[in-house]
């Protein structure tokens, strides 16, 4: 195998599941460096990788093969940064969120192609990841040419073309509730609901995944870009306010010890 990709394809010695964050609470991982302006017409790949050395090697290889790239080192960054991407390469072992949660979060609001690139090699891990919405699954160590071939196959199936602007998202309908993420408006029975930015993001996240309980940590990561601390009762306060504006506590259901899901009037 070409030696220049040796660090890319080998699993990092840190690539094991831990029982806590890999960096201290309150000190989020530093975002991956930018690689300059993308070439006109280049597809943009989001590389979600906790190991900076592996991420740099991977991104450099992708750039040499004509892709534009940007990076994320945490699940929270991935949930925010995927809107600018044409494809996501997702490591499952992240310091703040499990990669499966990140995969579900992206898939709930986008058809963006996702390839899991991970050291988890069991059949169960692969099945769970594919069920979470991943389009393909590649186990480290892997060959760079194989990665490129899998990317091309996934993009070909998705018929992805580079977009001039990020996708604004699709309107979410849940009974009489309508949420337009592009216009950032929400209506109930045709009447507009006056929401703050965080209230809108929280309601959109819950309504985008009907029937799914969204863990508090994922809510903090996706809405507040902070999965490191519970921030007191921030989520509960916003949920209470939303229930009042929707006119019924039944609209947002609390699942004790886990999180919240969208309900109905």
Image: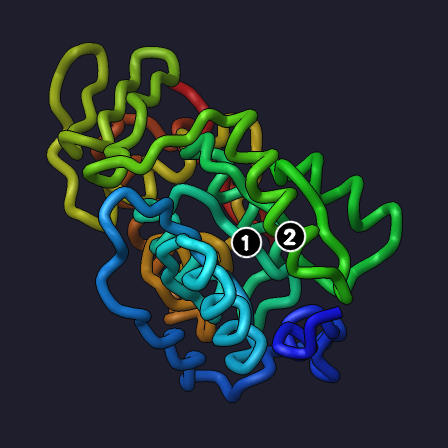
- Can I make out residue 244 in this image? no
Of residues 8 and 234, the one nearer the viewer is: 8
Q: Secondary structure at mark 1?
A: strand
Residue bearing mark 2: 147
Q: Quadrant of residue 117?
A: bottom right
Percent from the top left, x then y, of residue 180? 22, 26
Which callout, 1 or 2, points at the residue further toward the start of the chain?
A: 1
Give the number of the disc on residue 89. Answer: 1
Query: Viewed as shown, does residue 120 lie left or right of 265?
Result: right
Q: Secondary structure at mark 2?
A: helix
> Residue drawn at (38%, 59%), measured in percent from left and top?
69
Above or below, comparing residue 247 to residue 136 in the picture? above
Percent from the top left, x then y, of residue 240? 32, 45
Report crowding for label 2: few under 14, some 14 to 19, many 20 or more residues within 10 A (C-alpha).
Answer: some
Percent from the top left, x then y, of residue 258? 60, 51
> Residue drawn at (24%, 33%), measured in percent from left and top?
168
The reply to whether dot 1 and dot 2 touch (C-beta < 8 Å) is yes
Question: Which quadrant is home to the N terminus?
Answer: bottom right
Question: Which quadrant is home to the C terminus?
Answer: top left
Of residues 211 and 105, the one nearer the viewer is: 105
Of residues 109 and 19, the one nearer the viewer is: 109
């Amino acid at each position: 195998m070409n030696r220049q990709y040796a660090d890319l394809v080998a699993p990092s010695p840190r690539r094991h599941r831990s029982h806590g964050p890999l960096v201290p609470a309150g000190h989020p991982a530093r975002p991956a460096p930018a690689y300059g302006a993308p070439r006109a017409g280049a597809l943009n790949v989001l590389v979600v990788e906790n190991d900076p050395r592996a991420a740099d090697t991977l991104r450099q290889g992708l750039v040499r093969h004509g892709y534009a790239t940007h990076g994320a080192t945490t699940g929270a960054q991935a949930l925010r940064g995927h809107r600018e991407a044409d494809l996501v390469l997702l490591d499952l072992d992240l310091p703040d969120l499990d990669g499966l949660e990140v995969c579900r979060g992206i898939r709930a609001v986008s058809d963006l192609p996702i390839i899991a690139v991970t050291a988890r090699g069991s059949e169960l891990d692969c099945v769970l990841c594919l069920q979470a919405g991943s389009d393909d699954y590649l186990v480290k160590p892997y060959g760079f040419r194989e990665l490129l071939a899998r990317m091309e196959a996934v993009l070909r199936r998705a018929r992805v073309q580079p977009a001039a602007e990020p996708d604004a998202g699709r309107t979410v309908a849940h009974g009489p509730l309508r949420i337009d993420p592009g216009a950032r408006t929400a209506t109930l029975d045709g009447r507009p609901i006056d929401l703050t930015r965080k209230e809108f993001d929280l309601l959109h996240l819950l309504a985008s995944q009907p029937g799914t309980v969204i863990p508090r940590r994922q809510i903090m990561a996706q809405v507040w870009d902070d999965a490191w601390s519970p921030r007191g009762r921030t989520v509960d306060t916003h949920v209470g306010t939303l229930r009042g504006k929707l006119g019924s506590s039944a609209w947002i259901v609390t699942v004790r010890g886990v999180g919240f899901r969208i309900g109905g009037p």
